[in-house]
Amino acid sequence: MPNKSVEDGSKRADAWRDLASGRKRVAVGARSAVFAPVRRLCAVVLDEEHDASYKNSESPRYHARDVAIKRTQIESCRLILSSATPSLETWSRRERTTVVCLRQRVGGQALPDVGLVDMRSEARIRESGPVPWSARMDKAVESRLRDGEQVILLLNRRGFAHYLQCTTCGEVPGCPKCSIALTLHLTPERLFCHYCGFHDPVPVGCAVCGGETQRSRGVGTQQLEHWLIERYPQARIRRMDADTTAGKWSHSKILESFGKGEVDILFGTQMIAKGLDFPRVTLVGVIDADTSLHLPDFRSAERTFQLVSQVAGRSGRSAAGGEVLIQTRHPDHFAIEFAAAHDFENFAAREIERRREPPYPPHVWLANVIVSGESEPVVANASVELGRWITELVDRTTDGGLDVVGPSPAPLARIKGRWRWHLVLRSPSRKLLGRVVRYGSRNMPRRILSGITVVYDRDPVSLF
């Protein structure tokens, strides 16, 4: 059997040589394609420029958008940032660039009608159990299946259930290496950590009190699949998430079968939310729009708006028209309301104003300083000492203009066996922030670094 990594590396090397020699003139790829050695470069296009995957989460911690901006400046060529839901950092700079708004879809089709389904009061299908399945969603899906049309359903949660819980003592099995509950999967039947990959057999009883009855909490795509198969036995159903697309070409095979009309209901996580253009899709359903709405991150409302807006755009891409149903317990939240109205500009105005106090991007620039190590007390003490040192550095050299927030435990306090604290540097001056980060990363006292790792993450896409 050929080694897949060697084979892929060889293909990348061949592509690199073809571009460098001029035999190929167009490079298409993920974020690293921004470095491709295209000769006589005339344009760089970042499609879905708002996507968080453009930020490399490991060293070197570059953002492909920032690299593209700098490269096109150096090579005096054009940069095109494309998105129906631009990042607020990009949108806030619109007066210094040319904005082209596409007010109509290709073919002139109208945007789909969007309905908000208030799950606090909407009638539910009793047989669905924990799956949030309203009578309105049920009726809409049945109607599309009866008419031979296609349906896309979004549930941005992998696995069968969020976690298991003992009904006697309340114990929730957690990952021994990460500060997170283990997610229940039924195919294969195990408890998984989605951060470090740890897995365990599903326990027969509670490890703490010995209680026999354990109840699953929350709903993932595997549980939704069970419900859909049971509710619509005649429908052809496919699930699309990280578990079903792990194999080579599996992603393409699922979409190809859907495009051929061999699948009636396609459902899955955020990977089905953008870039899909299937004219027979007349209904898009968001099963739970609230999954990311209240995460402890300043971008939670923006991400919710982007995800809901993007998946809504999969419906009604032909003369048959389309409909979108968004199930939520917060129908009056502005991110949900503006997404339902296809109104990016008013959402952006509201969210940008909301980030003035306390200040967050695009009003300021951030650096997330992450301290990690195997000993929690060592990490905590080092974080406090590092915070004191950086604060003294800022007070001594910057004459104001930069805030140090923290240190404090990171929202995910432990990942892959390493405890994590962080502090956030915040400044309206990108140059000043960069100067402090460069000096701080190179000149930290050795006494602080003993037994820990310090990472300076400029312009973080998340503070988790």
Image (spheres, rainbow, N blue to C red):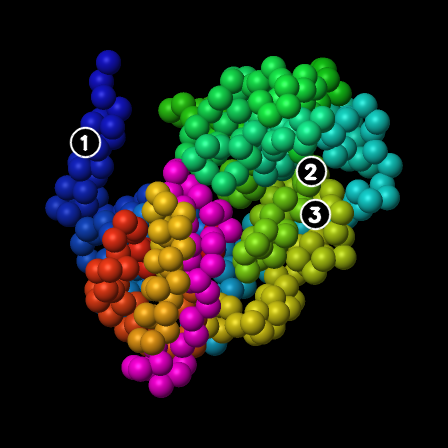
Q: Which residue is mark 1?
A: 10
The amino acid type, in three-letter code, at marker 1 is: Ser
Residue found farthest to the bottom: 399
Q: Position of residue 196 (x, y in %)?
A: 41, 34
Q: Which residue is mark 3?
A: 112
**Residue at horizontal 79 percent and vertical 42 percent from the top:** 119
Residue 198 covered by magenta stretch: no
- Label 1: few (<14), some or many (≥20) within 10 Å? few
Q: Which residues are magenta?
A: 394-423
Q: Is residue 458 visible?
A: no
The quadrant of the picture occupied by the N terminus is top left
Do the residues bearing badges 1 and 2 touch, measured as CB atoms within 8 Å? no
Residue 417 covered by magenta stretch: yes
Q: Is residue 352 above or below residue 328?
A: below
The amino acid type, in three-letter code, at marker 2 is: Ile
The amino acid type, in three-letter code, at marker 3 is: Pro
Q: Is residue 88 above or below residue 455?
A: below
Q: Is residue 391 above or below residue 253?
A: below
